[in-house]
Image: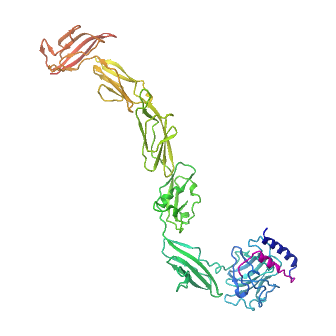
Amino acid sequence: MNLRDCLLIFSYFALVWLRHPKGMNIRFQLFAVFFILAGFSAFAQGSICSNIEPFCAGDQRLTFPNSNATNSSQISGELGPDYGCLEEQPYPAWFFLQVEDNGNLRFRISQNSREDGRGVPLDVDFVVWGPFERGEDYCSASNLSVANQVDCSYLPDSVETMTIPNARENEIYVVVITNFEQVPGFISLEQTNTGEGSTDCSILEFDLGDDIAVCGEDEYLLDGTSDEDAEYQWFKYDESLMEYVEIPNETGPTLLVTEEGDYKLIVTDVLEDKTEEDEINISFYDIPEIFPAEDLANCDSGSSIDLTLLNNQLIGAAAEVSDREVRFYESLQTAEDNEAIASPQNFPFEEGKQLYARVVDNESGCLSEIESFNLTIFDFPEYSLAEETVVCVNLAGNAIGSSTLGEDLGEEYQYEWILDGNIVSTEARYTLEVLPGNGILEQNIIHAESGCFQSYSTSIQPVSRPETLEVNISGSDFGDGYVINLEAVGGIGQEFASYEYRLDGGNWRSSPRFKDVRPGNHFTYVRETNGCGETRSTSFFLVGYPRFFTPNNDGFNDTWQLITDENIKIHEVMIFDRYGKSIIELKAGEDFSWDGTTNGRPLPETDYWFKVIFSTNSTDREEFMANISLIR
C-alpha cells in the first residue's frame, strides 16, 4: 500500500469521527496537508461565479476534479448568493448548464477520492438556481436568490440526486458543488433519466477532429460551426516565426484550406465571453494506385486461403511494398465503408466467391479505388508422366542410352526431379542417363505464386534389344505364297519394349508378319523403337520360281528356272503355250532351265504356263501350275 492510499484511509476514518452528525462546526484541516503531501493535484475550477464554467451531461458519466486547497484559493463561498440549505460552502465549484431538449432532468452527483470511484467516498453538497436566459447576469445576488433555487442538498452523503423539473429548451441553470471534506477528489455527474430531456453540449464538444489527410483533392473545408452565438478566428502556423498567425478576413465558421500545414480555430461564445480552441494538421496526398489482380486460386477445395498472396499484384511492381498496405473486403458495401477482413491470411475458402481490395498509403491512410477478384480452384495445365519410362541397356544390363522427360509449362512454374530421394535437377526437362536404385523417377511441379504443386512419378524400365530373332515360315511359292512370322526372343525388359521389323532392305514396320515373300535367300531384322538396339536373324532360303525372264543375252534373267534347294525334289517340269500346247518337257536328271526357245527357235513374247511335279522331305508327289511371262 502506498502513502497516498494510507492517507486516504486515515482521512476517511478521521472525518467519520469528527463530523457526525452533519452541522457541527468542526473542521479537520490537516486532511488538505495530508493529501498535498500525497502528491494529489488537479486543474483549477470556477471557484467564484465570475469564473463560472459550462458543463453538460450526455449519455455518459462526466468526471472532473473537485475544488480543494491544491487548485483553489477560494476556501468558502463568496458573499452575495443565497446558498439555501448549504450552511457552509467549502471550496465551491461553479458551473452552468443549458437545456437542449425539454423535459425533467435528474442527475446523480457523487464525490470520491479516486477518479474511477474506487477510493474513499467524500461528502458532496450542491445548490442549483434558475432558470435564466442567455445574456442575463447569472452571478447577481438578485438572480442567485432563494426565489430562484431549484434544488439543494446538505446531506452527509457521497452520492446526491439533483433534480430540475420541467426544464425548457435554451434555459440556463447555475450549479454550485462544494467539497465538505476539503480534500482532493473527483466529482462525477451523470443524467439518470436520459431520454426525457437533455443538456446542450455543443460548446463543450467543439472539435475540428483529428489531423486530416486529404486524398486525391487539392482543397479541404474545415468546419468549426457552433450552435452558440460565436465569433471565429482562424490561424495558420508560420514555421519561420514558429507561432500561429491569424488569417486575415477569415471570421466565419468554415475555412477552405488549399495549403498543407497546421491550423487553429478559436471560437468565442459572445454572450458568455468563453472561448474554445482546437488545432489540426492538414496534409494533401495523391490517391494510391491499385492494379488489377488475377483471380486467386486455392490449391484445392480446402478450408482457407491466404488473400495476401495478391498483395504484390495489387500494389504493383513500381511501388515500395513497405509504403503500402492492402485491405480486403467481403462485399462492395464493406469496401466502401472500409470495413476490412480481420484475418486475410486465413480466409474461409469458397469457390467462385467475389472479394474486393483497396490499397492503403501507410503515411497518409489514403485509400485507392476498389478492385475485385474471385476465388477459384487452381487449374494445373494438362500434364503427365508416362507410367513407365524406358532406359536402354545392353544385354548385360548396363545403360547405353538416355531418355528425356518433362515439358516446360512456363516461367511461373518451378520443377524438381528426384532420384532415390535426392533432387537431381530443377529444369523443366530432365535427361535420364542412369538407372535409379528404387526404380522410380519423381517430379514435383510448383506454381511459384500460389504455392500449389503437383507430384508425378514414372517407373524406370531397362530395355535391351532382343537376344535373337526367330523366323517362322509357312506356305509355299508353289501354293498361296510364303508367309514369314518373326519373333523377338530374349533380352531385358521385353514387356516394356516396342519393336519394329524389316525383311531384307525393306521398310521398317510394326507387324512381324510378312506375306507373299518371294523365293530366294533372305534376312530379317528387329529393332527396339526406343533406340535400344537391333537384332538380325540368320539367313534363310525360300524355294520357288521366277515370275518372268528376259532371254536377250544381256546376262540378266536370260533363262527361266526353278529356285530350289536340297529340301525339295523336282520330278518333272512341263511348259505350255497359252493354248495348252506343250513346248518342252524336262525330266528328273535334266537341266530344269528354259531359254525361251523350242527346237532352237525363239518363241514370241507372251505369257506361258508351267507345271511342276515335286516332293519335299515331308510330302509325297505334288503338282503345281502357274503362268510365267517371257519378255523380250
Is residue 399 toward the left or the right of residue 564 in the image?
A: right
Residue 31 magenta-drawn?
yes
Image quarter in which the C terminus is found: top left
Residue 461 shows up from this direction: yes
Q: Is residue 225 above or below residue 384?
A: below
Residue 36 magenta-drawn?
yes
Is residue 384 toward the left or the right of residue 112 in the image?
A: left
Comparing 240 with 51, the one in front is 240
- Looking at the image, which residue sits at the far left? 601
Comparing 581 with 115, the one in front is 115
Q: How is the image coloured?
A: rainbow
Image location of residue 426, percent across then percent down: 46, 45
Residue 390, located in which quarter of the rendered image? top left
Image location of residue 104, percent across then percent down: 73, 79
Is residue 375 toward the left or the right of residue 618 in the image?
A: right
| Residue interval drawn in magenta | 24-44
Image location of residue 538, percent across then percent down: 34, 20
Residue 324 shows up from this direction: no
Image quarter in which the N terminus is found: bottom right
Q: Is residue 591 above or below residue 151?
A: above
Q: Is residue 393 above or below residue 251?
A: above
Number of marks in the rendered image: 0
Report the residue at 42% width, 45% height from top.
Answer: 408
Image location of residue 182, percent across then percent down: 79, 80
